Image: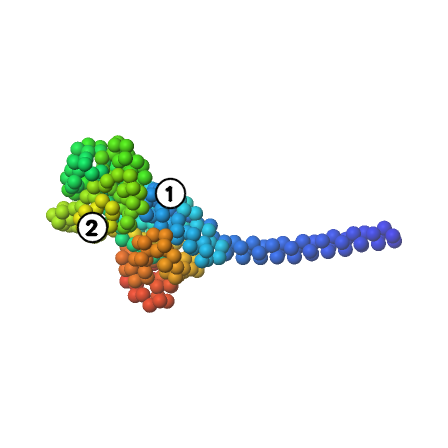
Amino acid sequence: MLLNKYIKVILFGCLIIFILSACSDVSGEGDAGTNGSDSHKLLLGTSSQGGTYYVWGGGWADIMAKSITDVDIAVEVTGGPNSNMQLIQSGDMEIGFVTAWLGGEGYNGVGWTNQKHDKIRSLFAMYPSVMHMYALKGKGIESIHDFNGKHVSTGAPGSTSAEAGTALLDALDIKPKKISGLPTSTSVDGLRDGTIDAGFAVTGVPGPFMMDLETSHEVQHIGLSNKDMETLLEKYPYWNEMVIPKGTYKHQDEDTKLVAFWNLAIASSDLSEDLVYDLVKATFEKNKELQSVDPTAKDTIAENIKYSTVPLHPGALKYYREVGIEIPDELIPPESK
């Protein structure tokens, strides 16, 4: 009888432990599920260090982390727009920055690629950037045609700078002695030590790399003639024209006419609608803070989404409709039609 009593006590104790364990597991699963759905670790593809994408992206990521609970965005140095689209398409990255020109081609699988990057979706239009063309003063390079026979850096492979710089040289029949695909910071170092004669860099205005270069060297800012601009816009209708007013840079003595591109923030279609809605909303609500990071953010307003060439993410679409922005049919994502 005593043995049976002990057995019953042991069995009862095991039952209590089992029940408590099960309850603990259920509670733990619920907490993990909540944390899992609310915690978002994202990778943001920018460009090479020194470019506006990198500076802008770092500031934006910090602001998003402070504005949205459990959002952590890591900023990645990449080759630029083309690389960012490829990484999002492959699932290795969630967010990236692109130019409207390359973004539209990438989504549709034309121009620089024959593969449709159909997982990319636009979030918001950032700012227009220009293709800076530069050399050092006193080196005999005062126009784009003086790039003939020189060592020119177009920018990191896959970047808008590299794609547009090569396209510009080809369209204007300019033949440098050597063309190198170097990141902006490396190009600037090459200019300083004399291994590079001239360079291209697509950034916002003012470009951080240019401000840095002008602290130690006199820069020759190179613009385009009306004839050259006409030739370029006829061949590349998705390009635009922009004039940088004289005095924008320390050594800029006159207005400088350059090619311009709108920039877009894009994301993977795999991201949730709620998360993207929160990111887009916070971006516009924190615009003043963004401008303190980079003055180009003054153009980051909801109305400028019209410059996008990539369909919106459903979460972004929800926000724009909520604030009364009319969205053209071509920007409605396939999954929302």
Picture quadrant where residue 269 is located: bottom left
Residue 143: give x, y in percent of width and height. 16, 41
Residue 217: give x, y in percent of width and height. 26, 39
Mark drawn on residue 310: none
Foreground: disc 1 or disc 2: 2
How crowded pointer 1 is (Cα within 10 Å; few <14, some 14-19, many 20+) is rated as some
Left or right placement of residue 243 versus residue 11 in this view: left
Counting labels gives 2
Question: Taking 116 as reference, is 197 above or below it?
Answer: above
Left or right placement of residue 123 versus residue 145 in this view: right
Mark drawn on residue 246: 2
Mark drawn on residue 77: 1
Which residue is rendered at x = 73% and y = 56% of the image?
16
Residue 200: give x, y in percent of width and height. 24, 42
Residue 187: give x, y in percent of width and height. 28, 37
- Which amino acid is tagged 1? Val
Left or right placement of residue 265 versus residue 65 in this view: left
How crowded pointer 2 is (Cα within 10 Å; few <14, some 14-19, many 20+) is rated as few
Picture quadrant where residue 184 is located: top left
Which residue is rendered at x = 43% and y = 47% of the image?
74
Secondary structure under badge 2?
loop
- Which amino acid is tagged 2? Lys
Question: Taking 307 as reference, is 183 above or below it?
Answer: above
Question: The C terminus is located in which quarter?
Answer: bottom left
Q: Nearer the viewer, residue 39 or 30?
A: 39
Left or right placement of residue 205 versus residue 257 in this view: right
Residue 81 in sight in this render: no
Q: How is the image coloured?
A: rainbow
Secondary structure under badge 1?
loop
Which residue is rendered at x = 15% and y = 48% of the image?
229
Q: Nearer the viewer, residue 40 or 336?
A: 40
